[in-house]
């Protein structure tokens, strides 16, 4: 069976009941093509990932965050974004979204800047640094903070402890181990002032992988 990006993306989003503006499919497909091209020389995703797996693991999974970013004035801080997951994918699908990406690996930063230029995206800031090297960020008005990279809940809440009084919602995008991770994070939550307030669970339609969004609010 031949692969069609838009068909594959639409099928997955429909299964998860995620609405996407029809105008977003074209730039997302361009992102997909550039990702595949750059991945031959820059380590953005695993080389063995099939086209259908790229759509599900990186595009659809990132877009599970989209419904929570649609309020006017939303600004997402995506820490360790890598190839732009989930932040730049969500921005491509939702133009009004404000976006700040933090990514220390310069080859990946080059890719992110290329995508922003190629798609003509605005209101995107890319910081080629680690979060700890950007102490002024916690004075900024973010509405959401996330990290899709492999970081456990507790260490991530420690990492963003400086944002706990800003009103930004912290979103952890997790797999099936989230219950254990949340339990292990209890002491850190007490120390940082974060409380867990919403859990949204998904099953990715093709692979059956369990994905969970955990929302935390600061004190």
Image (cartoon, rainbow, N blue to C red):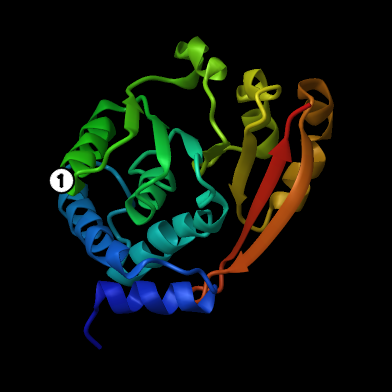
Residue 95 at x, y percent in the picture: 34, 49
Which of the pair 194/66 is nearer the observer? 66
Name the residue rendered at 78%, 46% in the picture: 197
Residue 167 at x, y percent in the picture: 67, 30
Q: Neighbour class for label 1 at 10 Å: few (<14), some, many (≥20)?
A: few
In the picture, which quadrant includes the C terminus? top right
In the rendered image, is residue 205 in sight?
yes
Q: How many marks?
A: 1
Q: Is residue 17 above or below residue 84?
A: below
Q: Is residue 64 left or right of residue 50?
A: right
Residue 84 at x, y percent in the picture: 36, 43
Quarter location, residue 141: top right
Which of the pair 156/76 is nearer the observer? 76
Check the image and name the residue furthest to the bottom.
Answer: 1
Check the image and name the residue furthest to the front.
Answer: 72
Residue 5 at x, y percent in the picture: 27, 72
Name the residue rendered at 28%, 74% in the picture: 6
Name the residue rendered at 78%, 42% in the picture: 196
Which of the pair 70/13 is nearer the observer? 70
Q: Is residue 15 left or right of residue 153?
A: left
In the rendered image, is residue 206 in sight?
no
Q: Is residue 157 above or below residue 171?
A: above
Determine whether the residue tagged by mark 1 lies in a helix, strand or loop.
helix
Name the residue rendered at 49%, 55% in the picture: 66
Task: Find disc 1 in the rendering and name its residue.
Answer: 118
């Amino acid at each position: 069976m031949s692969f069609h990006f838009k068909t594959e993306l639409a099928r997955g989003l429909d299964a998860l009941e995620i609405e996407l503006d029809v105008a977003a499919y074209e730039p997302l497909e361009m992102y997909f093509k550039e990702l595949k091209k750059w991945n031959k020389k820059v380590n953005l995703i695993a080389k063995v990932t099939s086209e259908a797996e790229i759509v599900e693991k990186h595009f659809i999974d990132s877009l599970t965050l989209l419904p929570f970013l649609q309020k006017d004035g939303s600004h997402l801080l995506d820490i360790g974004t890598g190839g732009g997951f989930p932040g730049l994918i969500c921005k491509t699908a939702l133009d009004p979204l404000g976006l700040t990406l933090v990514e220390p690996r310069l080859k990946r930063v080059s890719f992110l800047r290329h995508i922003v230029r190629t798609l003509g995206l605005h209101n995107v800031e890319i910081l080629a640094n680690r979060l700890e090297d950007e102490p002024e960020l916690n004075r900024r008005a973010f509405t959401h903070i996330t990290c899709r990279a492999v970081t456990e809940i507790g260490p991530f809440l420690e990492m963003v402890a400086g944002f706990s009084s800003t009103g930004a919602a912290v979103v952890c995008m997790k797999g099936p181990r989230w219950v254990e991770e949340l339990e292990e994070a209890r002491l850190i939550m007490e120390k940082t002032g974060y409380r867990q307030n919403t859990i949204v669970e998904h099953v990715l339609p093709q692979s059956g992988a369990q994905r969970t969004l955990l929302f935390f609010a600061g004190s």
